[in-house]
Amino acid sequence: MMSDTPEIVKKVFAIFVVGIFIVGFFVTFTQMPKGNEVNVNDTVSRFYVMKDVDQATQMLDKGTYFNKDMVPLRNDVPYTPITFGKSSNLEDGAANVVTSIVVDYRGFDTLGEVTVLFLAASGVMLVLHGEKRKVPKKKTEPSEIMYVGTRIAFAVIFLFGIYVFIHGHLTPGGGFPGGAIIASGILGLFLGRKGYSPNKAGLTVFESLSGMAYVIIGIIGLVAEKSFLANFLPTGTIGDLFSAGFIALIYIAIGMKVGSELSAVTNAMIVDTEED
Amino acid sequence: MKTYNIAALLVGVPLLMAFSIPLFGFISKQLAKWITVLTLGFEFFFALYIFLWHIYPFNVIMGNWVPPFGENLYIGPFATVLIILVSFVGLMISIYNLWSANHGDVVHFALLFLMFVGGSIGLISTGDIFNIFIFMEITGISSYALAAYGPERRALGGAFKYLVVSSIGSTLYLFGVLLIYTQLGTLNIAEIAARISQTTSGLLTFAGILLVAGLAVEAELFPFNGWVPDTYTGAVNPVSATLSGIGSVGGVYVLFRILMTVFGKDGNFVSTYGNIDLMSLVAILGSATVVIGELSALAQKNVKKMLAYSSMAQMGLVAIGFSIGSKMGSYAGVFQLVNHSVAKAMMFLILGVIVSFGIGERIDDMKGLWYKSPFLTITFTIGSLSLLGLPLFGGFWSKFALVDASIQRGGWYDFVIAIVLFASVVEAFYYLRIVGYMFTSKPISTDKIKVSVSPAVPIVAFSILIIAIGVFPQIVGGISWNAAHELTDKMGGYVLNVIPTIVGH
């Protein structure tokens, strides 16, 4: 249907679209204010300069903070420095600021992201369902070193993955990288052993239960704190393993989910698309 | 600011049940399909409760971070009417699926279908432009897989086309969101809407063009709707009904939430900030969509393809309605959206029943359907008459309001009157041609078609709803009018309900 269009029309259209983009970006960049001309009061939402949502919320309720002449970077606003290992009962309490935004302040987005991954995995299963499972022809068997090596490496990789997602609120990493690390360990097992196939039903159960755990944590927040995905645990001392409330719980759920999901997708792809 | 946090279950329950469906699938495939019916039933009755007890407009605060710091859902009249619509159409199609979805991996099909509807509900209720992107991904990814489902190979081609176009569209949307974020440092719709005039206007224009281009893919507007015919024709009929009745609703909602609430400049007629008026741009795109969609539908020999092109044209009418920018225009847009969604979903479902009895999809195959199944013929006729806008059927009131709003606006919108009337004439021609074939021609074989209960329930419910709207338009009209008010009065209708202390600049 599309091939009826003459080649010249396609080319002109493509050049036109690219032209719009170039002009658009050019206009955008010429109109951007220079670095030293940026007035924080104009361009940044004034609340985000406060570094403390609880405090900003109180000022929001007073209603003075949307006045045009309000200056957000003020010296008279009290600022207490946060010390690693000492400050406790903070509003979020995660030492890793990325985690505190991803899981706590914008936790609803992350629930959506987990769902997107889950749907992508389910979509792969739906589309590849019923494809004939061809028995792969005999290829080179993996050597003994490969066989033993991947199994030892798998144990280490698995532990490392668990470490990454349990410490998500303290160190860089978290549920998504942790889960991906575990899945890469499973990928190693595929390489090391011919005809290896993980327990499919087990992966499905794991995937479902960890996904449900995330939503149930959200609903516990709704019951306990009257708000979906609210932190219902004490935030503790910043830097401790048991700190930042429910962030660790959510990252454990995400880590297990991503790990089992990527493993299941790898399995579906490897077994089903064997061509020769 | 009124909060009603328990309504977070509108998004939470579909997610929880979707995650649990693989577990139920171990017990029985039929159980997985029943879970979708029960979940969507819960959604529908919860939304109906919000509507009838008049709990809207309210905010749902996520994680105890009040807007604009955290994320929130905002459910005003516009969101309420669309959530009821989406969950009702989804519930009906899930009942239909009990009978029709038997091929392949039914468990994952049920899961993806549930998440498509749940994602659309999230898309409609959220109050955060980045969260909209997340829900666009959820609805997008589930619909690519749904479109590829089915025994026929042509489904894969359509699904792939949709995947390419739609993922480019959502990337463009993300670019637009990023540009706005560089200017204002916030993602909350209410705060952006109040402070939109502080941005650089050239950048705002470019961001607006990117957003319109991205969202027009889902809203089926002209240069971005090349995927529609192939995807709708290739997909199995319940999936075509879902895409037409639910997917496009979410797309239109977000498009006009962005244009009228975020970019909107209040006045007699809403226009947008920036160097060009994006509302006029969408009006032009919508008019082109109507003309091209109707003329293409006229030329089709395949009923399913004809319905696909007609779907495009109807979405064009919806876009024209909103883009008039007056209260009457938005009222017409919401009303037209409801009528289109109900009628088009029903017609795809009827076609699914017809095809399942071995009758083809071509127009000639419809000859003499009256002698085989009076039930399907009458319901198909009701759907056709509603779409072309005959009095006593739902479509009449929305087209009437559309013409009324165009007359009030005047100017070049006088052409819109011509376009709406032209569209009605063309629709009358191609729908009544099929209806005429159904009643007049004698078929070669008069084997009766026995429609079982599960597909009959949604078809009957849709027909009753169409006639009910046609006779008592106030059941949709009242809340559509409130929705129109929410759209055209951006500070009073939206922003101050979310952040009461904010001051517009």
Image: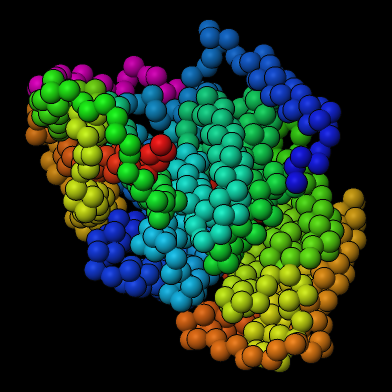
Q: Is residue B483 above or below residue B208?
A: below
Horizontal arrangement in the rendering, residue B452 relative to residue B278 (left or right): left
The answer to whether residue B177 is seen in the rendering is: no
In the image, what residue occupies the spot 77% across and 82% down? B367
> Above or below — where is B296 with respect to A196?
below
Count of numbered badges drawn on the protein: 0
Q: Position of residue B426 (x, y in %)?
A: 86, 67
Tell me if B195 is positioned left or right of B278 in this view. Answer: left
- On screen, B151 above or below B134? below
> Is B157 within the magenta?
no
- Label the magenta part by its dominant secondary structure: loop
Q: Nearer the viewer, residue A38 or B93?
A: B93
Report x, y in % for residue B155: 57, 55
Q: Residue B51, percent across and down?
A: 48, 71
Which quadrant holds the C terminus of chain A?
A: top left
**Along the line of sight, the residue nearer the viewer: B236 or B141:** B236
State which region is magenta.
A70-89
- Tell me if residue B242 comes above or below residue B289 in the rendering: below
Q: Residue at 86%, 54% (x, y): give it.
A: B413
Q: How has the structure been colored for display?
A: rainbow
